[in-house]
């Protein structure tokens, strides 16, 4: 019976090819518009480390002067998203977290062993030792360093996979030496492919979507080499004076990212009390003039505070779905016109013994065929649209970069994964059914004599 209904459906489509093409095209365009919007939203809205949703937290303190001009945010009620060095150092002394990380982004010049290769700039994450465990960084070779190496500081680095491929041809480089701005460091580890999106541990660059750094270096080198930050620096007190690097790290300027990992919610609450007590003590020394506004938030809340998804992504998704609804309504009208034009055939089939259920079923099968064809065409249009957006929006980020991870990141932003494809198929079937159920029911309700009299 299904095969027979399918044959009738395709014959019906061929009988009026222009109207059939319009129906399939309307569904295809609606599916493409909605799926492009959903894909872009999905890429931005994912949780980068869901298995630590209730144990990993970003730490902030509201160090700002009590001055409205120092809101510097769309949400002035939020504290600054980074910490000043004296406050990060104080927070780091607590043993309540099982692990904690203070860090920032800097840069160095790499002098390759091959004298024929010119020195080049590289990004460096200056961080404390727990970074790799806190963020579950996978290792290809070796491992990180100890907390003692932060204090020394030890002349060691961890390389990204890309940098290891570039400097050492991808072999195990643990124990080899690299020269960064005239100083030699020993490689102790090489991380495997790792590209959390969004780059939640430091959302300062590229709207939160960027590749990890090339090198990872013990935090102690911050003072030893006077390594300045290559990221956002906000002096949140009008008393701040930056006359030298040594003076800078003592001022009320926020530039460090700080994260803590806890065993349970109780430890997180204890740490909140610890931070609040520290700030209350600092108030007696003339710092932290505002009311207590220290926040220890999980990753999802952190992404919401930064508005990583963005109102534009939400608006485009809503508009895409609204456009799909408009396409459904247009398709409904086209299907009703098509079915009514072929109603005499249905009347003849009723007169020859077909029941109303048979007529409705045959039209529903045709509706499903239209939905499937429209969905397939819509997925092709979606792929073409995403490819165009990749060139339009992200191609500029590849200029001057030889890092394949950057290209992979941009591809991930416009990639349709299995859940998105399944959603597209489901939407196409649902769209076809929504557009065709009423016309199919309408035709099934008509009396055959109405059409036989006119033949």
Image: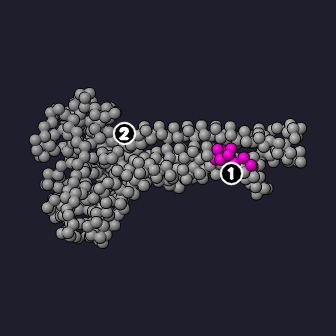
Can residue 274 be seen in the rendering of this structure?
no
Q: Is residue 122 left or right of residue 337?
A: left
- Alpha carbon of mark 2 to alpha carbon of mark 1: how far? 45 Å
Q: Which residue is mark 2?
A: 305
Vertical relation: 418 (above or below) 348? below
Callout 1: SS: helix
- Res. 446 in view: yes
Query: Is residue 1 rendered to the left or right of residue 306?
Result: right
User: Residue at point 25% right, 43% down?
Assistant: 232
Image quadrant where one finds the C terminus? top right
N-terminal label among 2 and 1: 2
Occupied quadrant, residue 58 = top left
Could you say which disc has been placed on residue 1 in the image?
Answer: none
Magenta stretch containing residue 19, yes or no? Answer: yes
- Which residue lies under the disc numbered 1? 369
Percent coordinates x, y for residue 326 in the rendering = 59, 37
Instruction: Pinpoint residue 306: horizontal percent, then vertical percent.
Output: 36, 41
Quarter occupied by residue 124? bottom left
Q: Is residue 111 magenta?
A: no
Sort mark 1 into few (<14), some (14-19) or many (20+) by Cα contacts within 10 Å: many
Location of the N terminus by quadrant is: bottom right
Callouts 2 and 1 close, C-beta under 8 Å: no
Q: Is residue 67 above or below residue 197?
A: above
Prevalent SS, magenta region:
helix
Residue at the extreme bottom of the image, as rendered: 171
- Nearer to us of marks 2 and 1 is 1
Viewer-side residue, 295 vs 360:
360
Q: Secondary structure at mark 2?
A: helix
Question: Which segment is the magenta one?
Answer: 15-24
């Amino acid at each position: 019976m299904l095969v027979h209904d399918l044959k009738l459906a395709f014959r019906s489509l061929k009988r009026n090819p222009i109207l059939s093409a319009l129906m399939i095209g309307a569904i295809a365009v609606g599916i493409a518009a909605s799926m492009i919007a959903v894909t872009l939203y999905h890429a931005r809205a994912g949780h980068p480390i869901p298995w630590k949703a209730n144990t990993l937290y970003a730490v902030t303190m509201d160090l700002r002067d009590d001055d409205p001009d120092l809101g510097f945010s769309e949400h002035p009620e939020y504290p600054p998203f980074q910490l000043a060095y004296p406050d990060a150092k104080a927070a780091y002394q607590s043993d309540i977290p099982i692990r904690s990380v203070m860090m920032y982004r800097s840069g160095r010049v790499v002098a390759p062993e091959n004298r024929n290769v010119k020195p080049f700039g590289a990004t460096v994450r200056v961080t404390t030792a727990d970074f790799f465990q806190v963020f579950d960084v996978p290792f290809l070779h070796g491992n990180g360093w100890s907390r003692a190496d932060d204090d020394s500081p030890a002349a060691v680095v961890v390389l990204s996979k890309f940098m290891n491929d570039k400097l050492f041809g991808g072999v195990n480089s643990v124990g080899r030496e690299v020269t960064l701005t005239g100083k030699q460091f020993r490689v102790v580890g090489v991380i495997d492919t790792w590209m959390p999106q969004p780059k939640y541990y430091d959302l300062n660059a590229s709207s939160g979507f960027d590749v990890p750094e090339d090198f990872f270096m013990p935090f102690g080198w911050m003072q030893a080499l006077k390594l300045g930050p290559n990221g956002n620096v906000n002096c949140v007190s009008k008393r701040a004076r930056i006359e030298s690097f040594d003076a800078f790290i003592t001022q009320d300027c926020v530039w460090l990212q700080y994260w803590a990992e806890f065993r349970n919610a109780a430890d997180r609450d204890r740490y909140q009390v610890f931070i609040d007590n520290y700030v209350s003590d600092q108030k007696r020394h003339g710092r932290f003039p505002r009311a207590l506004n220290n926040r220890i938030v999980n990753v999802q809340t952190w992404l919401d505070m930064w508005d990583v998804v963005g109102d534009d992504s939400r608006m485009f998704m809503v508009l895409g779905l609204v456009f799909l609804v408009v396409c459904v309504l247009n398709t409904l009208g086209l299907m009703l016109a098509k079915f009514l034009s072929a109603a005499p055939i249905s009347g003849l089939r009723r007169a020859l013994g077909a029941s109303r259920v048979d007529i409705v079923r045959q039209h529903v099968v045709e509706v499903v065929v239209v939905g499937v064809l429209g969905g397939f065409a819509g997925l092709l249009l979606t792929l073409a649209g995403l490819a165009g957006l990749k060139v339009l929006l992200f191609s500029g980020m590849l200029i001057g970069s030889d890092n394949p991870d950057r290209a992979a990141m941009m591809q991930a932003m416009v990639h349709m994964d299995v859940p998105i494809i399944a959603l597209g198929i489901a939407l196409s079937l649902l769209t076809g059914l929504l557009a065709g159920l009423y016309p199919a029911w309408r035709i099934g309700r008509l009396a055959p004599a109405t059409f036989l009299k006119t033949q």
